[in-house]
């Protein structure tokens, strides 16, 4: 009742009234009133869209002062010392590694800019998941990085909050929150129930309420405290949440809530009942259970969860608002506003702790919801947005680990997640395997849904205290190991043997990602905490559990010792855990390797799978897996790729090294060759059978095996190299492959522990190391060249001393990179003169000494098996047996040299061991002593057809007792040998442990390799030692008998360095020298062999096939060289085409062109058709045409007065005004004229085409027009994507591939004709004037085209059509009657103007640089003029209006003319003084009969010069002050009667002033307007002459250029200050005799045929009586060169202003903002918001600003895109980082600076219209940009 009363009252006064009631000491009535009011206002049964409730709350909270005011007051009590600003996805934030303690640290732009980070390692980034500012939080970052505000802790001095300010809030908000909760409860239904309600809809309705809550949190610390207290108070929750049984609605809601809670556990209620009744599991340690569930073909396996902590699996219970709010936040899948609301309160420390606990409490539930979510990507981001704030803080993470079992929860949830997609492993024993693995094709793995969980886990493991907890908890470790084993053996590959696999599975990337993220990253996290002696125990525990889990795995897959054939998995995370913990134990913790190793049998098993991967890599590269498709190559490449190698191939190689160092070397070596399937090849017989490999696979597999052995015995990454050494080696190998940019190098260097942090272990920083090994090559810029970036290239001494081919092989993803490294190495050697002949071999590099623990590895190089292999291979190479190669020899020599460099102490235990067959080959195991051991006879088994059999069968003279024995044993025993050894070891260990009853599958399954019955045993006579074979190979390689003299060894010692680089010969010499210096016996042996004179018979080369293989490499090399040469030639040819195309003068090519031009003089001009190759004249019937590109251009229109480019605005204050551009000025002038004068006359008095004019350029190639037509037809039928549209007439020049879109017909005729028209004439000017007049009468007569309908004229009309279609209508119709012939006339002659003006621009704005007539050949202006003239004959100028008369004659009576004008039209003709002389010249030339004689042309130029000069005088006089005008007028009058007064500027000037002064309007304008008139203080004769010349220069330039193109006259260069006289001379205006004494040229060029004063009077009279005369008189004709906008040096300046700037059209901040670099317009790229008529804003702007050419800077990408018509391309960036690199999309976020050279190149391409030619990769934009 009371509430009803209150409700009716005004809200504000009610609020004030209640507040005062509540402030009393007895406030019970107030409280009651308020509660009743709230009961009725906050009724959850009302729809949430009713905002009345919200309004009430706002008023109540604010009290009398109003909500805005209230917010301000509360904010003034903000005591926060942290920034805590929360942002969402796509926000631009900063990260400073120098200041950050946690790698997740981030700062808002404001805090970053207000902090001092100069010289720090920082970057800008675009937030993906959202985040919060850490400024002020010393847990996450160093205080030195705090911004000014948060460093000063201003919050601490804030006064405390007055009690009554927030009283109302404390009372109202709990009710408000429970109201929202009730809405949420009500709105929720389980997704699977039938009455599905859209969660989004509920959220949408609640939007205002949640926004209000979010707003409250932004009011600072005071309000936050109120909120957090309410949210965490248990009593409030109890009172409000459930105590409302009387309300039916509330009750229903509550039940809904309870049922939602019930399903919040990991185990559903039903499942729980099931597990209770489940039969007992088999009791394996992980509690696995084969409760198989058939899903499709593959079996999904479900595990029971019996061993896990039940409390983690259970349903949730809530105790405060916060808990329930979070619960609903999760249920509703993290609505953005809710997330920000919850996060905004984090600066409150107590809240942060409670919230973290609540989050952890709900963690399992979150992940459960995530797995079911349809929008898992968005949800993942939101989860991480929250969790990263909580878990990056070590104290907090430790706290919840201790109190809330965070680790247990995470591991359990991880297991739970992966269990949902387990399948039975098919590795090894498909039928009986008990191992389960994750199924990589399930969505969970494919979509990477698990990543938020894994990233949280990695995040908390980065805290030492948490990691310790993990490592100390054995049950947790066990659980973790069983988790890791889910990935062991996943994504199994089975080699396809018969048919190509039908469907290439794409699961492999999911598998690699899963192993890296879910297994390896946590491993690296743990390893960072196991780096010191004190942590030994941790390592021991992990190693123990690794081995146990591995044992379980071997048992589960049923592996004993023989691998199932044709299978490989790249995923062995258990092996890798074991390997990496071993490595760390030895390297950092000082643990003894022995104590961490299992028994020999286990080691042998551990070795098998990693070894199989190595063999498979080789198989894949040998094309043995082709039938499995491309994906298998992808796997092989990913396995070694830089982001994975640290966690994949490196641990595998290390583990194999450990095994090799501990196992019997003979066993190990034979295992390797067996795995690589090349055992059969290792026979000394010339012919052999291989049961496992095809012939062509043998050689690559043998190479693979040997390379692997070399890597294994030489790699030291985990065997003794320090971190700095590793970094250096990695860097060197990447740089040797290719020059690298800084960022790509950073990306390619494998780094751990944290690959993303950019922190490299070791003392040396990346930068220091880089500068030690590499030189920086600054980006090079050449017009038309590719955009280069800054590159790092190895220093010379790195090539000399550090290039390590083995490391390169290990790190190459693409095979071609190895070749590239070798090519670069050879180039270096050649250049430095170290090795100049032939191809150098990979250099041998000495290795870091082995860590003592791994000394056993050297035994690999000192075992008889390897020596037999080496001996056999040397022998076979010497005899040119098949499948040997240079690479094989290289690797063999490498192994020998490694053996010589890594001696082992002679193991005396050798004698004790039972002697076996190998002993008959070599006496001991030491390589040094075996080197000179001579093998006399060898027994081989060969087919009967083998050459060996043909020889006489003579029993060998047995020198040894075992002679008949050993031959038999060697080759075929390799496999048997390994087995024997294996058995031996097994037996040994089985006697130790008697329970070894495991079935030895090997003994039953293994059958000796197929021995077909045709094999016979033969005995070969050898009599060679390794040394003798080496010497023979030396001779073979050097192709010289006795290449080594008996005494060469003595000469050797002189220069030991000589051997470092070279070819095979050098390598052999080096080895022999080493052997000799290390053993006397070897030395003697070498000398003995060398001293022997060998029979002249060269080693037999009876096998042509063998020869072929040996030569293959060499031939391939030669082919490669040839190809490269061709490519280089082609490139240079292309380049020269480019230069031709560029139309930019370069003096070198000029001369060359000249020569070509001078030859074409006498005969008819012949054209080569680039399609049919024929050459001939262009005729009326079969015209030839020039390949041209027509494009609309606004470059001229964008020119300004000032030579300085306009500055791009980067603040709100700065602006760009477009009014002062050439285009705008001409538009104004035309419009002004049109308002006074007759339209048709106006349209002949100006030129257009400054904006949207058509520019015509050619590559200079010609073709028959009919050939072109069939060419276009063939293009149309060619369906290949070409990047241009044939339908629009686009094509590429068949010869130079330059882009083109039309063909300009060539005029038929002889060049001699042209010459005759050149003839100088002695006719008097007045005669010529008359002739010209007569000629103009003949308008329309066109001598060239005799038949109007010839093919030529048709083609000419077609090209006119093309020209018109090139630009938009609005650039053609300037007249008042659209489409009238006047418009067309104007457009046509303006095309000529545009092309002439553009040529001037390209020449630098003047003609001082000159130019030979040859240059005209490259230009198509002559042909263009011809076509235009042909077209313009259609129009005739009415002789009554012909300006020629008014130019050359004094009209009889002024009155007559005026009267005529008045009769005709209300508007008069344009006065001569306002007419544009260049335009008139072009009109005359184009409308007169073609070809025009030169004398007539000159006459035109002269007459128009008179007009131009008069205009100059008029304009000049307008600039004078009245006094000056008076003075000049007076002084000139005196000279009027002097001789030559008509050529005296003073007399003429005076006359003009007098004439124009007759009417006031000309000079009488506001002198307050100084903008139009530039006042020179005092005008001197010099400054007047200068001003007149400047005014006339543009006309002279244009005339001169026209003459150059029409008559082929040379342009002579001159100094800039003499340009006027130069041009005047060139045009014949000036006496050819130089007049150095008289610098006043301009008046002497005048040539009057009638009285100058009369004519001038006539012209002046036309303008008197008109308004705005001065504006039209004083025009400045000079324009500066076109420029793009001036850009700031630092990209950040642009980015900060524009990335959040709103578009002026749509008022929104665009998602993809872009900036026009021509005019500065800001547009929404791709935005639908600004789309009009189906065209997006960027494209639209390009049409209006650049006539379809647009240059845009994409703000968020720092990249420039070019729009040209319907196509676009990415140009690159003009901003580069400190390393000269682009940062597209600002991915790295490093500071970027303007690269002036690049920007100049961009501008140059714009001005020269060469975007189409230089940039490749154009694509259609469909108006969508
Ligand atoms: Zn901040
Ligand atoms: Zn700050
Ligand atoms: Zn910093
Ligand atoms: Zn042709
Ligand atoms: Zn061409
Ligand atoms: Zn623009
Ligand atoms: Zn826009
Ligand atoms: Zn927009």
Image: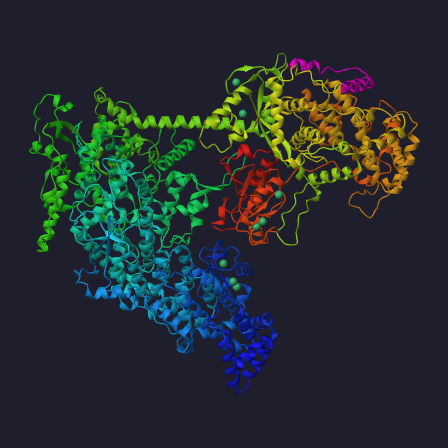
Name the colouring of the figure: rainbow
The part of the chain drawn in magenta is 1310-1337
Residue 957's image quarter? top left
Residue 585 can be seen, yes or no: no
Residue 1355's image quarter? top right
Q: Position of residue 390 (x, y in %)?
A: 41, 65
Does the magenta portion include 567?
A: no
Horizontal side, residue 389 vs residue 967: left or right: right
Q: Is residue 1762 above or below residue 393?
A: above
In this view, the residue farthest toward the top is: 1163
Of residues 42 and 1774, the one drawn nearer to the viewer in this rendering: 42
Q: Quadrant of ligand 6?
A: top right
Q: Position of residue 942 (x, y in %)?
A: 13, 28
Tally of numbered tags: 0
Q: Is residue 273 above or below residue 1673?
A: below
Of residues 1168 and 1544, the one drawn nearer to the viewer in this rendering: 1168
> For the C terminus, which image quadrant?
top right
Horizontal side, residue 607 vs residue 1568: left or right: left
Q: Is residue 807 above or below residue 1143?
A: below
Q: Position of residue 1743 (x, y in %)?
A: 60, 40
Horizontal side, residue 819 vs residue 1649: left or right: left
Characterize the magenta stretch by its predominant secondary structure: helix
In this view, the residue farthest toward the bottom is: 26
Residue 1033's image quarter? top left
Horizontal side, residue 1825 vs residue 1546: left or right: left
- Which residue is found at the position 77% from the left and 39% from the top? 1232
Of residues 8 and 1590, the one drawn nearer to the viewer in this rendering: 8
Does the magenta portion include 1331?
A: yes
């Amino acid at each position: 009742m009371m509430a009803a009363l209150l409700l009716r009252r005004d809200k504000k006064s009610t609020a004030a009234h209640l507040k005062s009631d509540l402030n009393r000491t007895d406030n019970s009535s107030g409280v009651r009133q308020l509660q009743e009011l709230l009961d009725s206002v906050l009724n959850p049964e009302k729809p949430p869209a009713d905002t009345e409730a919200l309004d009430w709350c706002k008023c109540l909270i604010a009290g009398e002062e109003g909500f805005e005011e209230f917010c301000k007051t509360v904010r003034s009590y903000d005591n926060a010392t942290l920034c805590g600003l929360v942002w969402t996805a796509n926000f631009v934030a900063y990260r400073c590694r120098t200041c950050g303690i946690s790698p997740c640290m981030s700062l808002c732009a404001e805090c970053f800019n207000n902090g001092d980070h100069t010289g720090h390692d920082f970057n800008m980034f675009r937030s993906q998941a959202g985040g919060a500012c850490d400024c002020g939080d010393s847990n996450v970052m160093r205080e030195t990085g705090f911004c000014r505000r948060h460093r000063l802790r201003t919050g601490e001095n804030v006064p405390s909050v007055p009690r009554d300010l927030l009283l109302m809030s404390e009372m109202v908000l709990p009710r408000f929150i429970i109201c929202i909760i009730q809405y949420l409860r009500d709105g929720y239904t389980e997704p699977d129930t039938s009455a599905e309600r859209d969660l989004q809809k509920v959220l949408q309705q609640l939007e205002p309420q949640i926004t209000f809550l979010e707003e409250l949190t932004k009011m600072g610390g005071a309000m936050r405290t109120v909120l957090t207290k309410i949210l965490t108070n248990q009593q409030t929750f109890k009172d409000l949440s459930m105590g409302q049984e009387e309300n039916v609605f509330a009750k229903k809601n509550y039940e809904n809530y309870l049922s939602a809670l019930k399903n919040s556990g990991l185990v559903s209620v039903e499942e729980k009942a099931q597990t209770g009744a489940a039969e007992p599991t088999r009791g394996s340690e992980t509690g696995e259970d084969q409760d198989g569930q058939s899903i499709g073909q593959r079996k999904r396996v479900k595990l029971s969860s019996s061993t896990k902590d039940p409390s983690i699996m259970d349903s949730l219970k809530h105790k405060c608002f916060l808990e329930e709010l979070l619960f609903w936040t999760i249920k509703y899948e993290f609505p953005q506003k809710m997330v920000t609301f919850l996060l905004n309160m984090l600066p409150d420390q107590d809240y942060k702790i409670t919230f973290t606990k609540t989050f952890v409490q709900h963690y399992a539930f979150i992940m459960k919801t995530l797995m079911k979510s349809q929008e898992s990507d968005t949800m993942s981001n939101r989860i991480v947005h929250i969790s990263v704030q909580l878990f990056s803080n070590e104290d907090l993470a430790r706290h919840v680990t201790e109190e809330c079992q965070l680790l247990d929860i995470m591991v359990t949830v991880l297991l739970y997640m992966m269990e949902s997609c387990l399948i039975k492993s098919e590795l090894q024993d498909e039928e009986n395997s008990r191992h389960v693995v994750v199924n990589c094709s399930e969505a969970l793995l494919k979509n990477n849904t698990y990543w938020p969980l894994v990233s949280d886990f990695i995040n908390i493991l980065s805290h030492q205290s948490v990691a310790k907890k993990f490592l100390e908890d054995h049950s947790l470790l066990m659980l973790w190991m069983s988790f890791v084993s889910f990935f062991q053996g996943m994504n199994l590959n089975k080699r396809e043997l018969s048919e190509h696999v039908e469907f290439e599975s794409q699961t492999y990337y999911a598998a690699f990602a899963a192993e890296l993220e879910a297994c390896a990253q946590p491993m690296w996290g743990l390893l960072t905490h196991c780096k010191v002696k004190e942590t030994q125990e941790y390592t021991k525990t992990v190693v123990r559990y690794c081995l146990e889990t591995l044992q379980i795995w071997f048992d589960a897959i049923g592996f004993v010792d023989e691998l199932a054939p044709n299978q490989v998995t790249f995923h062995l995370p258990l092996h890798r855990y074991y390997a990496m913990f071993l490595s760390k134990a030895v390297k950092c913790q000082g643990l003894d390797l022995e104590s961490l190793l299992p028994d020999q049998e286990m080691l042998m098993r551990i070795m098998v799978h990693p070894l199989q991967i190595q063999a498979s890599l080789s198989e894949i590269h040998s094309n043995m897996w082709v039938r499995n498709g491309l994906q298998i190559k992808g796997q092989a490449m990913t396995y070694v790729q830089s982001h994975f190698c640290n966690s994949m191939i490196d641990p595998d190689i290390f583990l194999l090294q450990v095994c090799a160092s501990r196992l019997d070397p003979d066993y190990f070596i034979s295992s390797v060759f067996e795995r690589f399937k090349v055992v059969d090849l290792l026979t000394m017989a010339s012919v052999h059978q291989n049961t496992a490999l095809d012939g062509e696979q043998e050689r690559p597999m043998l190479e693979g095996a040997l390379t692997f052995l070399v890597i294994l015995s030489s790699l030291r990454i985990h065997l003794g190299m320090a971190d700095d050494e590793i970094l250096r080696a990695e860097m060197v190998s990447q740089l040797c492959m290719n020059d690298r940019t800084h960022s790509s190098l950073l990306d390619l260097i494998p780094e751990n522990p944290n690959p993303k942090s950019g922190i490299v272990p070791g003392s040396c920083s990346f930068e220091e190391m880089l500068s030690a090994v590499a030189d920086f090559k600054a980006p090079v810029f050449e017009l038309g060249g590719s955009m280069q970036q800054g590159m790092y290239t190895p220093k010379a001494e790195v090539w000399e001393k550090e290039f390590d081919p083995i490391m390169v092989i290990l790190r190459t993803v693409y095979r071609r990179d190895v070749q590239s490294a070798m090519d670069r190495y050879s180039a270096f050697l050649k250049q430095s003169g170290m090795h100049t002949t032939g191809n150098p071999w990979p250099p041998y590099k000495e290795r870091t000494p082995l860590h003592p623990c791994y000394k056993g590895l050297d035994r690999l190089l000192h075992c008889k098996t390897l020596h037999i292999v080496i001996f056999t291979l040397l022998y076979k190479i010497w005899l040119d047996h098949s499948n040997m190669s240079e690479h094989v020899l290289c690797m063999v020599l490498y192994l020998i040299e490694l053996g010589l460099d890594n001696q082992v102490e002679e193991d005396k235990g050798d004698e004790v061991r039972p002697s076996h067959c190998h002993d008959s080959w070599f006496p001991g195991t030491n390589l040094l002593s075996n080197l000179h051991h001579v093998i006399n006879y060898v027994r081989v088994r060969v087919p009967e057809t083998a050459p060996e059999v043909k020889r006489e069968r003579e029993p060998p003279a047995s020198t040894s007792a075992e002679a008949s024995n050993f031959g038999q044993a060697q080759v075929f025993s390799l496999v048997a040998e390994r087995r024997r050894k294996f058995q031996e070891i097994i037996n040994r260990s089985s006697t130790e442990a008697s329970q070894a009853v495991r079935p030895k599958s090997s003994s039953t399954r293994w059958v000796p390799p197929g021995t077909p019955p045709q094999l016979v045993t033969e005995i070969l006579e050898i009599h060679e030692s390794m040394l003798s074979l080496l010497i023979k190979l030396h001779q073979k390689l050097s192709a010289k008998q006795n290449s080594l003299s008996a005494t060469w060894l003595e000469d050797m010692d002189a220069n030991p360095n000589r051997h470092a680089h070279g070819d095979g010969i050098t390598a052999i010499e080096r080895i022999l020298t080493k052997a000799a210096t290390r053993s006397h016996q070897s030395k003697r042996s070498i000398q003995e062999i060398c001293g022997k004179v060998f029979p002249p018979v060269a080693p037999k080369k009876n096998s042509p096939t063998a020869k072929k293989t040996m030569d293959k490499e060499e031939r391939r090399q030669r082919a490669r060289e040839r190809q490269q040469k061709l490519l280089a030639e082609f490139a240079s040819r292309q380049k020269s085409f480019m230069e031709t195309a560029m139309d930019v003068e370069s003096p070198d090519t000029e001369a060359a062109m000249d020569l070509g031009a001078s030859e074409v003089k006498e005969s008819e001009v012949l054209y080569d058709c680039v399609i049919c190759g024929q050459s001939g004249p262009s005729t009326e019937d079969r015209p030839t045409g020039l390949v041209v590109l027509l494009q609309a251009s606004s470059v001229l229109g964008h020119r300004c007065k000032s030579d300085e480019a306009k500055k791009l605005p980067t603040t709100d204050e700065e602006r760009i005004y477009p009014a002062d551009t050439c285009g705008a000025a001409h538009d104004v002038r035309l419009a002004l004229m049109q308002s006074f004068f007759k339209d048709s006359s106006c349209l002949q008095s100006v030129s257009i085409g400054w904006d949207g004019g058509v520019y015509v350029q050619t590559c200079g190639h010609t073709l028959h027009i009919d050939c072109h037509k069939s060419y276009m037809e063939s293009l149309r039928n060619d369906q290949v994507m070409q990047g241009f549209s044939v339908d629009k007439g686009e094509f590429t020049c068949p010869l130079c591939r330059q882009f083109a879109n039309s063909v300009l017909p060539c005029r038929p005729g002889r060049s001699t004709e042209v010459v005759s028209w050149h003839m100088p004439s002695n006719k008097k000017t007045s005669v010529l004037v008359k002739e010209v007049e007569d000629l103009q009468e003949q308008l329309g007569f066109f001598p060239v085209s005799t038949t109007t309908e010839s093919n030529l004229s048709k083609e000419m009309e077609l090209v006119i059509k093309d020209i018109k279609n090139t630009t938009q209508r609005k650039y053609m119709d300037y007249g008042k009657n659209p489409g009238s012939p006047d418009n067309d006339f104007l457009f046509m002659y303006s095309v000529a103007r545009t092309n002439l003006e553009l040529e001037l621009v390209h020449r630098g704005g003047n003609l001082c640089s000159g130019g030979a007539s040859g240059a005209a050949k490259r230009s198509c202006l002559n042909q263009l003029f011809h076509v235009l003239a042909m077209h313009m004959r259609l129009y005739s100028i009415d002789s009554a209006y012909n300006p020629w008369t008014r130019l050359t004659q004094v009209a009889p009576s002024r009155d007559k003319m005026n009267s005529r004008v008045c009769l005709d039209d209300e508007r008069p003709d344009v006065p001569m003084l306002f007419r544009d002389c260049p335009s008139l010249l072009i009109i005359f030339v184009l409308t007169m009969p073609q070809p025009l004689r030169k004398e007539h042309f000159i006459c035109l130029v002269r007459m128009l010069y008179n007009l131009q000069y008069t205009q100059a005088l008029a304009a000049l006089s307008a600039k004078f002050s009245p006094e000056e005008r008076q003075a000049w007028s007076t002084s000139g009058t005196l000279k009027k009667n002097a001789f030559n007064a008509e050529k005296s500027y003073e007399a003429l000037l005076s006359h003009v002033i007098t004439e124009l002064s007759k009417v006031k309007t000309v000079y009488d304008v506001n002198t307050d307007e100084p903008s139009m008139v530039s006042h020179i203080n005092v005008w001197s004769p010099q400054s007047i002459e200068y001003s007149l010349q400047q005014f006339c220069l543009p006309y002279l330039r244009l005339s001169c250029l026209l003459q150059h193109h029409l008559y082929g006259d040379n342009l002579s260069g001159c100094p800039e200050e003499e340009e006027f006289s130069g041009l005047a001379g060139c045009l014949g205006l000036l006496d050819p005799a130089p007049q150095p004494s008289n610098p006043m040229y301009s008046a002497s060029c005048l040539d009057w045929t009638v009285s100058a004063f009369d004519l001038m009077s006539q012209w002046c009279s036309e303008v008197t009586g008109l308004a705005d005369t001065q504006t039209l008189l004083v025009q400045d004709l000079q324009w500066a060169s076109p420029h793009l906008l001036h850009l700031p040096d630092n990209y950040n300046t642009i980015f900060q202003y524009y990335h959040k700037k709103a578009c002026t059209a749509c008022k929104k901040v665009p998602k993809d903002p872009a900036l026009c670099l021509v005019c500065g317009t800001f547009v929404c790229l791709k935005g639908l918001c600004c789309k009009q008529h189906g065209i997006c804003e960027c494209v639209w702007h390009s049409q209006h600003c650049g006539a379809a050419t647009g240059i845009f800077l994409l703000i968020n990408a720092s990249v420039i895109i070019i729009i040209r018509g319907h196509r676009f391309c990415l140009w690159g960036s003009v901003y580069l980082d400190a390393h000269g690199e682009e940062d597209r999309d600002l991915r790295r976020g490093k500071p970027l600076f303007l690269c002036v050279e690049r920007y100049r190149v961009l501008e140059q391409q714009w001005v020269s219209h060469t975007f189409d030619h230089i940039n490749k990769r154009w694509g259609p934009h469909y108006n969508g940009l």
